């Protein structure tokens, strides 16, 4: 009998010690996780600070950057805009001006703004490209200019807003802002917006753009004093400003002082950038950014049109893979 009680006691002690061990083990490994997490968080911040890459840190201040994005309905539209919205979320001084190539705004675009929580710092406009200027089915994309109607609508909206703001706070000097044309298919580093934030009043900022114009990189060429001498472009280098739309941004005071500056259907292919810039600056006066134009922070990527043959076959039978789903 005594033996039996001793045996039970032994089992109880063993059981309690196992439970105790497991309890303390779980406590200590939890602590381990916490310290790992906080260490890596601190690590990322200090790394960013060491590198001077403030764009990776949240709550960065700077002039408002009006990012103008023309966009049109197609299967990849939501993917493109989601990608952009997540970049913009990381840069608090960007105000997103989306202009849909359509006769009304769409719920797809509204939903992108809602999901990314960008409604308070964005506006959703529309401006349909006139049919005679719109690309048709098999047209090569270079046949007609893209984004003209939409960017001009955005420029009008921005000019009106800035004039209104100037009236409301006449003595306030903090109204400096910048306009950047941010196409929906390019690839943008958050660091680019750090550079754009450096643009001074009265200046057009310039920097390299990767994968464009038949080159790995199109970039401003600087002289020894760091002034813009010209550009290295291979495609139509005779253009007054042979650079891509993604390669410059404009201090908004220039747009108010030069109300005639905008885009046009009347100009030759590849001349949209020159068309607006000719009113605003000369190469020599441009402000070189991105480490004296040695860093690439934006790429002129182009998204392949997806092949949807199976989807078309489904549709013939009155079905679709995305029934009730926004893709
Ligand atoms: C190049 C430049 O990068 C563009 O900034 C310039 O507008 C264009 O050439 C031109 O010469 O017109 P690319 O990549 O060929 O750009 O043009 P897309 O990316 O196809 O279009 C530029 C922007 O216009 C995009 O944001 C796109 O969504 C928008 N777009 C395009 C429309 O709003 N409607 C259209 O029918 C086509
Ligand atoms: Mn593009």
Image (tube, rainbow, N blue to C red):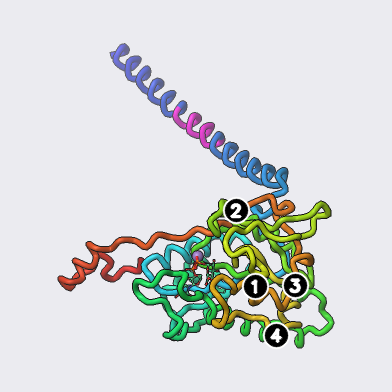
Query: Please, what secondary structure does the residue beneath circle 4 have?
Result: loop
Residue holding disc 4: 259
Residue drawn at 46 percent across, 64 percent down: 80
Residue holding disc 3: 281
Q: Which residues are magenta?
A: 22-31
Q: Is residue 323 above or below residue 157?
A: above
Label 2 or label 1, whichever comes before in sequence order? 2
The answer to whether residue 121 of the structure is visible from this angle is: no
Counting from the top left corner in percent of width and height, residue 134 is at 43, 80
Q: Residue furthest front?
A: 238
Total count of labels: 4
Residue holding disc 2: 217
Q: Is residue 226 above or below residue 178?
A: above
Front one among 159 and 291: 291
What is the distance, in whole Å, between disc 3 and disc 2 at their CAs?
Answer: 23 Å
Label 3 or label 2, whichever comes before in sequence order? 2
Q: Main secondary structure of the magenta part?
A: helix
Label 1 or label 3, whichever comes before in sequence order? 1
What is the distance, in whole Å, between disc 4 and disc 1 at their CAs?
Answer: 16 Å
Residue drawn at 57 percent across, 41 percent down: 37
Query: Please, what secondary structure does the residue beneath circle 2 have?
Result: strand
Q: Nearer the viewer, mark 4 or mark 1?
A: 1
Mark 2 CB near ligand 1 (8 Å cut): no
Is residue 129 rendered to the left or right of residue 196?
left
Front one among 167 and 177: 177
Label 2 or label 4, whichever comes before in sequence order? 2
């Amino acid at each position: 009998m005594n033996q039996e009680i001793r045996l039970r006691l032994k089992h109880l002690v063993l059981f309690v010690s196992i439970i105790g061990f497991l309890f303390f083990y779980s406590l200590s490994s939890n602590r381990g996780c916490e310290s790992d997490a906080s260490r890596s968080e601190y690590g990322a911040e200090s790394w960013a600070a060491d590198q001077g890459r403030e764009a990776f840190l949240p709550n960065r201040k700077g002039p408002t950057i009006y990012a103008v994005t023309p966009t049109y309905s197609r299967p990849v539209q939501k993917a493109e805009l989601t990608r952009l919205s997540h970049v913009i979320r990381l840069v608090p001084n960007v105000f997103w001006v989306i202009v849909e190539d359509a006769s009304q705004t769409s719920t797809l675009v509204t939903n992108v703004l809602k999901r990314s929580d960008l409604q308070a710092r964005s506006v959703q406009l529309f401006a349909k490209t006139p049919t005679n200027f719109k690309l048709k089915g098999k047209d090569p994309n270079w046949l007609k200019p893209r984004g003209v109607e939409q960017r001009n609508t955005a420029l009008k909206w921005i000019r009106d807003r800035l004039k209104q703001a100037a009236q409301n706070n006449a003595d306030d000097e903090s109204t400096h802002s910048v306009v950047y044309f941010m196409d929906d298919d390019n690839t943008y580093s958050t660091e680019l917006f750090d550079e754009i934030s450096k643009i001074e009043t009265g200046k057009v900022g310039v920097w390299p753009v990767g994968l464009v114009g038949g080159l790995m990189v199109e970039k401003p060429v600087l002289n020894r004093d760091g002034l813009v001498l010209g550009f290295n472009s291979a495609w139509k280098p005779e253009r007054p400003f042979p650079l891509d739309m993604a390669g410059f941004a404009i201090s908004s005071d220039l747009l108010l002082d030069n109300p005639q500056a905008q885009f046009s259907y009347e100009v030759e292919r590849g001349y949209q950038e020159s068309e607006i810039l000719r009113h605003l600056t000369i190469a020599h006066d441009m402000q070189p950014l991105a480490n004296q134009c040695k860093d690439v922070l934006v790429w002129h990527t182009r998204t392949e049109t997806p092949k949807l043959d199976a989807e078309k076959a489904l549709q013939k039978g009155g079905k679709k893979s995305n029934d009730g789903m926004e893709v």
